[in-house]
Amino acid sequence: MSLAVSHGNGVTVITITSNPKSKWPILCQILGSLCHSPVCAVSQQVKAKMMGVYMALGIMQIIVGLLNLMTGILFISSGIHDYIMMCNAPFWLGGVFLVVGVVSIVAAWFPSYFLLLVTVVLNKVSAVLAMIGLALYAWDLVSFKVFMHYEEMNYDKMIREALDITMMIFSALQLCVTLSFYVLTLKELCKTNSDEDPQLYKPLKEDVTVSHVC
């Protein structure tokens, strides 16, 4: 897969040529070219400020995702089949958080504007899901307390209450961090695009070609 950029008469033409010998689908080759091309390369300023944030956010997303999966497993092993388990909320929340965490770490390792924008969108989705998770665990805790007025407390139900409270705390923490990250990243990207860079005013070569094996 190769990517060629041509400039002329105020028009920029991007040509992507697929590699017929590659085992990857065309879509994967196009995404790989976009991620590694100079068109999507980020500045050193953005790398220095944001890459550590992406790594930390990705690790946190993975931890919260694993905690959601473990909570679902503990609910099932304890024989809990209430409202939150009817829709398997801990499992699909945990799965989505794991995917977003992995993408955030990939964006930290291979920074590009394309991956940054994808990660920003995914983290916005993650923030919405964190709100949903917070509401679901709070609802489960409230319904549990109402139900416990009519039954005697036991060890399994104490564990369930502790799990609900723990996941509410992690969901609230994740919501705050992802929203802050979303706003700060967009602000940094917009600031970078608006700054005048002397390199932008240098004459461009007529054709720039980037090739890599996909």
Image (cartoon, grey):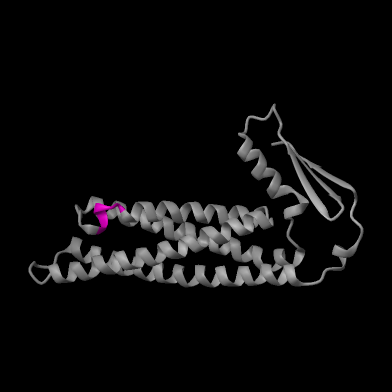
Q: Is residue 202 part of the magenta span, yes or no?
A: no
Q: Nearer the viewer, residue 162 or 138?
A: 138
Residue located at (35% from left, 67% from top)? 134
From the image, which quarter does the N terminus lie in? top right
Camera-side residue of 203 and 147: 203
Quadrant assignment, res 191: bottom right
Residue 104 position in % (x across, y down):
57, 57
Above or below 166: residue 212? above
The quarter of the rendered structure image containing the C terminus is top right
Name the main secondary structure of what is drawn in magenta. Answer: helix
For the magenta stretch, what is the residue range?
84-88
Residue at left 61%, top 59%? 117
The residue depicted at 37 percent of the width and 57 percent of the height is 68
Task: From the viewer's perspective, tell me whether residue 171 is left or right of residue 146.
Answer: right
Task: Answer whether residue 87 is magenta in the image.
Answer: yes
In the image, taking residue 56 as reference, residue 69 lies left or right, namely left
Is 199 on the left or on the right of 181, as rendered? right
